[in-house]
Amino acid sequence: MPLFLVFLTIYTVTVLGNLGMIMIIQINPKLHTPMYFFLSHLSLVDFCYSTVVTPKLLENLVVEDRTISFTGCIMQFFFACIFVVTETFMLAVMAYDRFVAVCNPLLYIVVMSQKLCSLLVGASYSWGIVCSLTLTYFLLKLSFKGNNIINNFVCEHAAIISVSCSDPYMSQKIILISATFNEISSLVIILLSYVSIFITVLKMPSTGGRHKAFSTCASHLTAITIFHGTILFLYCVPNSKSSWLMVKVASVFYTVVIPVLNPLIYSLRNKDVKETVKKLMKIEFIELP
């Protein structure tokens, strides 16, 4: 019960934080910019990812019958995979957006057109679906008979193949190639963008200009560090691959911690978002009888 209350509280904050961020961006015309367009989709992905996993986790904490159907398990993996891959590239897209904003401010509106923004977001979702379909297809080619106890609270890839009675070599290879490609390609985009930003900022003559440029990137860099730091530390350390405890810690971090942190990071460090929240609170206060 204590764990149930902790996770329920975190999930409630996740839902309110991410949906609240989307609402704030929609109602404030000042936030109708490419950066906030991407941020609204990041919030949507975080909300969806947490919602795919957390309700079942909460159920398992209070009921004795901790079962999930085979179809339900595969569907949970399928949707979770879509959203985690989408978030990986959404963060890379946001890094490119910051690169254009800082390095080419005069051309920002022209370069980051509504068409390009929609294309980048659509490509992130599409690649997430392609990756998820591929990984799910190779999972479904495995045989599952006999042992059906998954050593995790979520239908994570390693936990699913561990109960398979057929050779999981191909499925493991595909997810390794997919994860490596996604990590390297997204991190290359992020690193190149921020190296260019850093060089541009150092060339700025005014201290105020440097501070403003760094402050616009600080929230995004924090989100990137948490997200990719978790992947690299928990999944790329050789010893952790055979540790179910580490896999479970990673699963908790992905499904519970990261989705609740992103709206807090962006709202606490963003003046426009905080001003919108204050205005909404004033309106609600005035309207109360």
Image: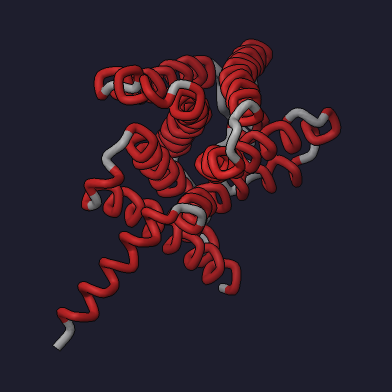
Residue 193 point in image, percent of width and height: 57, 22
Residue at the location (85% across, 33% down)?
Answer: 239
Residue 83: which quarter of the image? top left
Q: Position of residue 70 (x, y in %)?
A: 46, 35
Residue 39 in percent (x, y) is at 40, 40
Left or right: 31 in relation to 136:
left
Q: Pick whichever, 62 or 260, lies toward us.
A: 260
Residue at 66%, 13% (x, y): give it. 173
Q: Nearer the viewer, residue 272 or 259?
A: 272
Query: At x 25% / y 19%, what residue is drawn?
Result: 115
Seen in the picture, residue 220 relative to 288 is either above or below; the reply is: above
Where is 53 relative to 277, above or below? above
Residue 172 location (% of width, % of height): 65, 18
Q: In this image, 137 relative to 107: left or right?
A: right
Query: Is residue 227 visible in this depiction of the protein?
Result: yes
Image quarter hosting the C terminus? bottom left
In front: 20, or 208? 208
Q: Residue furthest bottom?
A: 289
